[in-house]
Amino acid sequence: MNYKQLPKPNDSEFDRKSLFNYLPIFLSILINNVLRLIRWSPIIWHDRDWGY
């Protein structure tokens, strides 16, 4: 059988230039988790007394 290679999208993740591409993986994960915590902080704050 003959298989054709899939075309590469024009806007590929590997072509994007950002700071996260050049950071070590542990630093990238740390920054990502801090940003996620900041994003979730309003929900965490509003549900702080859910068990009482």
Image (tube, rainbow, N blue to C red):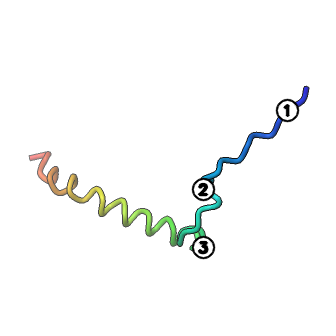
Relative to residue 38, is residue 26 drawn left or right?
A: right
Corner quadrant of residue 23: bottom right
> Spatial distance from mark 2 to mark 3, Cα to Cα?
14 Å
Residue kind at label 1, given as amino acid type: Tyr
State the residue at coordinates (54%, 69%): 18
Relative to residue 9, is residue 35 drawn left or right?
A: left
Relative to residue 25, is residue 51 drawn left or right?
A: left
Spot the residue most to the top. Answer: 1
Question: Residue 21: x and y, percent?
Answer: 59, 68
Question: Residue 47: x and y, percent?
Answer: 16, 50
Mark 3 or mark 1: which comes first in sequence?
1
Point out which mark residue 12 bears: none
Point out which mark residue 22 bears: 3
Binning the other alpha carbons within 10 Å of mark 2 as few (below 14), some (14 to 19) or many (20 upward) gives few
Find disc 2 in the rendering and name its residue: 13
State the residue at coordinates (60%, 73%): 22
Point out which mark residue 3 bears: 1
Question: Residue 25: x and y, percent?
Answer: 57, 68
Residue kind at label 2, given as amino acid type: Glu
Q: Assign a secondary structure to mark 1.
A: loop
